[in-house]
């Protein structure tokens, strides 16, 4: 299981981006974050859709998300995406929202 958070909590996601060779990139463009979950009816819900991220350090970006009080209880997929030295890169993390 991934990280566990309660409703009405602000979460800061940090996404480090590296090249295909696991090196520090020369350029990072369009860093975004998407958060999705599947509800009780097996419908894919997009909670945050390609939100721009903020530069934290040389190759690390972050995004703050306030988990709504009405948030679905269960697993969420957090996906960070960017163009890194001309290549599309992404990484995913699973988080759990609990009461």
Image: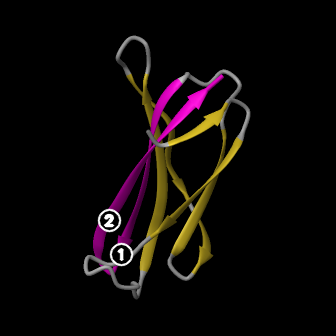
Q: Please rate how many residues cluster around mark 2, counting C-alpha atoms within 10 Å: few if below 14, some from 14 to 19, many from 20.
A: some
Counting labels gives 2
Q: Earlier in the sequence, mark 2 or mark 1?
A: 1
Labelled pair 2, 1 in contact (Cβ < 8 Å):
yes
* In the displayed structure image, the side of residue 30 where residue 72 appears, left or right: right
Q: Secondary structure at mark 1?
A: strand
Q: Position of residue 52 (x, y in %)?
A: 55, 58
What secondary structure is the stretch in magenta mostly built from? strand
Residue 21 on image: x %, y %:
26, 81
Residue depicted at 47% across the width and 65% down the height: 31
Q: What's the residue at 43%, 13% (across, down)?
A: 40
Per the image, label 2 sits on a secondary structure element best described as: strand
Q: In the rendered view, would you say 66 is above or below 71?
A: below
- Number of other residues with Cα within 10 Å of mark 1, as a class: few under 14, some 14 to 19, many 20 or more: many
Q: 61 left or right of 64?
A: left
Q: Tell me: residue 30, above or below residue 93.
A: below
* Membership of 93 in magenta stretch: yes
**Coordinates of residue 78 in the picture (x, y in percent):** 46, 46
- Residue at position x 47%, y 43% in the image: 2
Which residue is the site of mark 1? 84
Determine the residue positioned at 42% across, 72% down.
17
The one of 53 and 42 positioned closer to us in this rendering: 42
Instruction: Name the image quarter holding the C terminus.
Output: top right
Magenta region: 74-99
Residue 28, how many percent across, how many down? 43, 77
| Residue 57 sits above or below residue 68 on the image | below
Give the number of the disc on residue 73.
Answer: none
Whether residue 82 appears in magenta in the rendering, the answer is: yes
For label 2, the residue is 89
Residue lying farthest to the bottom in this orientation: 26
- Could you say which quadrant of the image residue 43 lies in? top left
Tell me how far mark 2 sits from mark 1, CA to CA.
6 Å
């Amino acid at each position: 299981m991934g990280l566990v958070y309660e409703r009405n909590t602000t979460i800061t996601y940090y996404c480090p981006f590296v090249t295909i060779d696991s090196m520090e990139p020369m350029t990072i463009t369009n860093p975004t974050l998407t958060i999705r979950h599947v509800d009780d009816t097996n419908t894919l819900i997009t909670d945050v859709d390609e939100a721009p991220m903020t530069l934290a350090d040389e190759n690390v970006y972050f995004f703050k998300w306030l988990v709504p009080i009405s948030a679905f209880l269960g697993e969420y997929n957090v996906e960070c995406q960017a163009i890194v030295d001309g290549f599309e890169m992404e990484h995913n993390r699973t988080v759990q929202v609990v009461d």
